[in-house]
């Protein structure tokens, strides 16, 4: 077993430059274990300086497609359920990279050690989530890479590569919060199909994603407080600037509140009309 890099940022870079999903998540887990072992021993790994790639390394498959070119499948069919699980695996693999990227990319911004604790923990949990869903796919005769995937998953990271506050607003507080909205219906779909492995994986993801959204809200408010910035106004401005999708009801208000995001953050953005004249919430 090879030694890990000497700094947390270098560990993050190593994860980001590992292409295979299983290998990426195994390295992510080892890096997280080393980080927390050092923290527990009172000898934390140095943060260091990151040099993350513009885009994380990816396996040859899945083929990445423009959203408009993604095949449409009925969620209630067997093929539709496989496609949904494949999409979840793709989201979780991107989440692994997103959480390591926030560590590597913003080392010039001095942050408390708790910031790194939170995102390392989140990255380790996303690694577990990816493997749980991959295990379910394989139990059903498929695998990650068997179907095409969404090509725009990294766009939020690319758009906010120079803006930590924007990254916190758009990734955990919008994209991951959306997961809190839609996961209960996915769990119900797999319960109806009598697929307990999928149900168990999604229930684990649902329970742990609340904390990831909460980390985003916590550090967003921390930076707003440090900069004497109104957090609600800043959130609205940053989402309008960086988010290219729809804030689409219904919202899981209970779980969003549990994660520290009150309704007056997201409801004012839900029904806005874009400059092109289209409602922000008209796309599926």
Image (cartoon, rainbow, N blue to C red):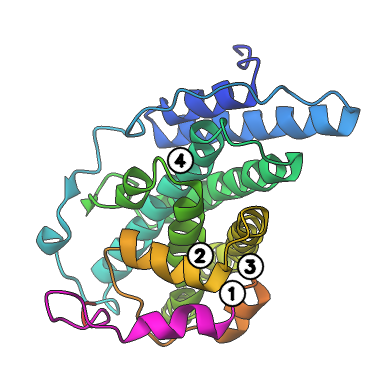
Give whichever of 121, 230 is nearer the camera: 230
Q: Which mark is residue 207?
A: 3
Mark 3 vs 4, N-terminal side:
4
Give the mark, 2 or 4, whose residue is nearer the N terminus. Answer: 4
Provide residue 213's location: percent of width, then percent of height: 58, 63
Image position, residue 141 (x, y; %): 34, 53
- Mark 2 and mark 1 lie on one chain; the one further toward the N terminus is 2
Main SS of the magenta part reads: loop
Badge nearest the viewer, 2 or 4: 2
Q: Would you call the spot at circle 1 few (<14 residues within 10 Å), some (14-19), or many (20 or more)?
A: many
C-alpha distance separating marks 2 and 4: 17 Å
Give the number of the disc on residue 124.
none
Reading the chain from its start, which is encountered first: label 3 or label 2?
2
Badge 4 local density, few (<14 within 10 Å), some, or many (20+)?
Answer: many
* Extent of the magenta region: 262-281
Above or below 195: residue 227: above
């Amino acid at each position: 077993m090879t030694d890990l890099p000497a700094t947390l940022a270098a560990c993050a870079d190593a994860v980001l430059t590992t292409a295979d999903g299983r290998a990426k998540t195994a390295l992510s887990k080892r890096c997280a274990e080393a980080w927390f072992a050092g923290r527990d021993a009172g000898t934390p790994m140095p943060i260091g300086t990151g040099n993350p790639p513009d885009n994380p390394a990816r396996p040859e498959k899945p083929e990445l497609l423009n959203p408009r070119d993604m095949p449409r499948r009925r969620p209630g069919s067997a093929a539709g359920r496989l496609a949904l699980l494949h999409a979840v695996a793709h989201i979780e693999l991107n989440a692994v990279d997103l959480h390591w990227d926030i560590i590597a990319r913003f080392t010039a911004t001095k942050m408390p050690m708790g910031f790194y604790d939170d995102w390392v923990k989140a990255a380790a949990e996303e690694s577990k989530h990816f493997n749980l869903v991959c295990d379910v796919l394989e139990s059903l005769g498929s695998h990650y890479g068997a179907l095409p995937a969404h090509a725009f998953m990294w766009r939020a990271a690319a758009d906010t590569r120079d803006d930590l506050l924007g990254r916190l607003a758009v990734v955990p507080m919008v994209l991951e919060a959306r997961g809190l909205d839609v996961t209960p219906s996915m769990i119900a779909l797999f319960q109806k199909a009598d697929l307990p492995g999928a149900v168990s994986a999604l229930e684990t993801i649902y329970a742990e994603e609340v904390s990831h959204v909460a980390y985003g809200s916590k550090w967003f408010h921390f930076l707003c407080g440090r900069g004497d910035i109104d957090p609600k106004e800043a959130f609205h401005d940053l989402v309008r600037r960086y988010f290219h999708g729809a804030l689409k009801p219904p919202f899981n208000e209970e779980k969003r509140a549990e994660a520290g995001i009150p309704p007056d953050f997201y409801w004012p953005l839900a029904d806005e009309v874009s400059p092109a004249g289209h409602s922000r919430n008209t796309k599926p």
